[in-house]
Amino acid sequence: MTPLGRLIAAQIAAAGPMRLDEYMRLCLLHSQHGYYATRDPFGAAGDFTTAPEISQMFGEMAGLALAQSWLDQGRPAPFTLAEIGPGRGTLMADMRRVIATVPGMADAARTVLVEASPHLRQIQRQKLGDVRHVENTSDFDRIPLFFIANELIDALPIRQFQRQRDGWAERVVALDDAGGLRLALSAPEPGLDLDAHAPLGQIRELCPAAGPLVARVARHVARHGGCAIWVDYGNWHGQGDTLQALRRHRPEDILAHPGEADLTAHVDFEPLARVAQAAGARVSRMVTQGDWLMRLGIAERARRLQAAGDAGAAQALHRLTAPGEMGHLFKALAIWAPQAPLPPGFEPLDDDADHA
């Protein structure tokens, strides 16, 4: 058992079974043994590879989308250029390179990063130079916000509930007879009705932090202007058990190596769109990453890079946009100021739409 696993087992032995969201929080963010607090997990040497690490084209397309939105909203100055969970800073670096080509935009931008990991903050400063780090989105200045979050919400802790004959029981982490970690069910919660028509055994996931986070960003954009783009893997009307562990680029049991494997769950985009609408912002339909990038012109950019000698551009284009790669698994959602034009690459979400 890992050092963090032993701490978790001792906590369960003393206080009883642990909710999955608390287990995820400890595994990812424990100050001494947490996954993000102790390592650089990105790239071939880490445990997973994100779109910005595959190719500069992803960040360039995102930068173009935000730049066009900035132009469409009258070139506000100053404005906050922000990212939550910026990893190594690769996405922000690629976006800022594009933004530097738009007259006046770089001078107006105030780069702000929301990052919990001291280790990653140091890496980001090395790549990006003088940037401002904040603890959360409530620390943003009250000026227009142009924002991106890539593979952020999937790492927010979730709760899981399973349909039983007498209600919905929460899945928890408990101890087996040998003192190891195992999954168990709590007693059904009275009055909890996630779906009256769900079959027995159906699992539903809730992400307590996702809705408030999206709502805060949406309220900021609605009041002060700007645009926020969320990219993640997931779907509309999410359901089922999607919690997964990834270690050294391979999936494994979520209880196998606490603190040494990345834990994520698929994002349910529908409730996030609804809370953004309720906060006063306009919201797009969910679009696949592949379609979004193609609409922004990534194929032409790949051709130009290849012509300039980038031998990996065609393969990167395939990985980012092909249905069997990241193109359909990953989705994008935009939130923008009520009176502003639609951000490029998106379609508006109708108020009565029941799907994206």
Image (cartoon, rainbow, N blue to C red):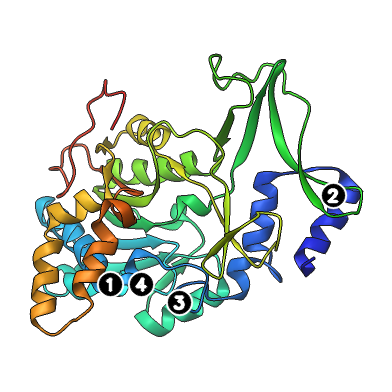
| Element under disc 1 | loop
Residue 53 is marked as 4
Specify which label sits upstream in the sequence, 3 or 4. Answer: 3
In the image, taking residue 156 as reference, residue 277 lies left or right, namely: left
Residue 1 visible within the image: yes
Residue indicated by mark 1: 55
Marks counted in the figure total 4
Asked if residue 320 is positioned above or below residue 208 in the image, the reply reads below
| Element under disc 4 | helix
| Element under disc 2 | helix
Residue 67 image position (x, y, % from top left): 16, 61
Specify which label sits upstream in the sequence, 1 or 3. Answer: 3
Could you tell me which residue is drawn at 25 percent across and 55 percent down?
A: 322
Q: Mark 4 is on which residue type?
A: Glu
Residue indicated by mark 2: 12
Q: Mark 1 is on which residue type?
A: Ser
Residue indicated by mark 3: 44
Mark 1 and mark 2 in contact? Answer it, CB < 8 Å: no
Q: Mark 2 is on which residue type?
A: Ile
Residue 129 visible within the image: no
| Element under disc 3 | loop
In the image, taking residue 18 as reference, residue 143 lies left or right, namely: left
